[in-house]
Image (cartoon, rainbow, N blue to C red):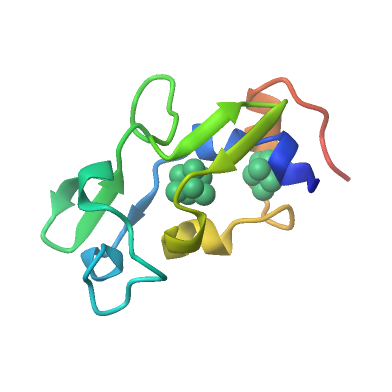
C-alpha cells in the first residue's frame, strides 16, 4: 500500500478546481471523466469538486478515513490538479500537518 493510500490529507485540505473539459463527456476527460454531479460550477471556465471548499474541506470522491485507509472513488477519472499532486508537492506536508500526520522527508 502506498503512503497516499494511508493518508488522503490533500483530498481534505485544498480546493480542487479544473476546467469543465475534464468532466464526463468533455473533450479532455481522463477515463470516464469527472461526474458532473460531483462538481459545482464556479465560472464558465471553472468547476470545483464538491466538498473541497467546505469547512473543513473534504472531496466528495474521497472514501475512507484520513490517515488510516483511503481511496479515490473516481481515480481513473480524477482531474488534472489531482494528477499533478503527489508526495513531491510542496503542499503535501502542509496537508499532512493539518491532519496531524507525520511529515514525510
Ligand atoms: S498529502 Fe501527500 S502523502 Fe497524503 S495523500 Fe496527498 S500526496 Fe499522498
Ligand atoms: S478526486 Fe480523488 S484524488 Fe482528487 S481530491 Fe477528490 S478524492 Fe482526492
- Furthest-bottom residue in view? 27
Name the residue: 42% across, 61% down: 77
Across and down, in percent, residue 98 comes to: 63, 25
Q: Residue furthest right?
A: 105
Residue at position x 22%, y 57% in the image: 46
Give the image quarter of residue 105. top right
* Residue that lies at the very extreme toward the left in this rendered image: 44
Q: Nearer the viewer, residue 71 or 51?
A: 71
* Rendered location of residue 8, percent (x, y): 62, 37
Q: Is residue 32 above or below residue 38?
A: below
Q: Please state the horizontal and vertical placement of residue 40, each as a whole percent of the image.
A: 19, 43
57 in relation to 20, above or below:
above
Q: How many marks?
A: 0
Relative height, residue 103 to residue 4 (above, below):
above
75 vs 101: above or below:
below
Decide if residue 30 is on the left or right side of residue 44. Answer: right
Q: Tell me: 75 left or right of 7.
A: left
Where residue 103 sits: x, y (%)? 82, 34
Whether residue 20 is visible, yes or no, is: yes
Direction from residue 46 to residue 64 in the image, left or right: right
At x 69%, y 31%, the residue is 69
Determine if residue 13 is in view.
Answer: no
Q: Residue at x 41, y 70 (%)?
A: 31
Amino acid at each position: 500500500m502506498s503512503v497516499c493510500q494511508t493518508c488522503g490529507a490533500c483530498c481534505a485540505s485544498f480546493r480542487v478546481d479544473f476546467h469543465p473539459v475534464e468532466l464526463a463527456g468533455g473533450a479532455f476527460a481522463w477515463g470516464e471523466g469527472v461526474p458532473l454531479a460531483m462538481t459545482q460550477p464556479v465560472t464558465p471556465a471553472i468547476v470545483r469538486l464538491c466538498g473541497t471548499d467546505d469547512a473543513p474541506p473534504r472531496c466528495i470522491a474521497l472514501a475512507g478515513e484520513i490517515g488510516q485507509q483511503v481511496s479515490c472513488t473516481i481515480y481513473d477519472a480524477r482531474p488534472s490538479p489531482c494528477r499533478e499532486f503527489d508526495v513531491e508537492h510542496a503542499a503535501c506536508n502542509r496537508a499532512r500537518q493539518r491532519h496531524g500526520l507525520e511529515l514525510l522527508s
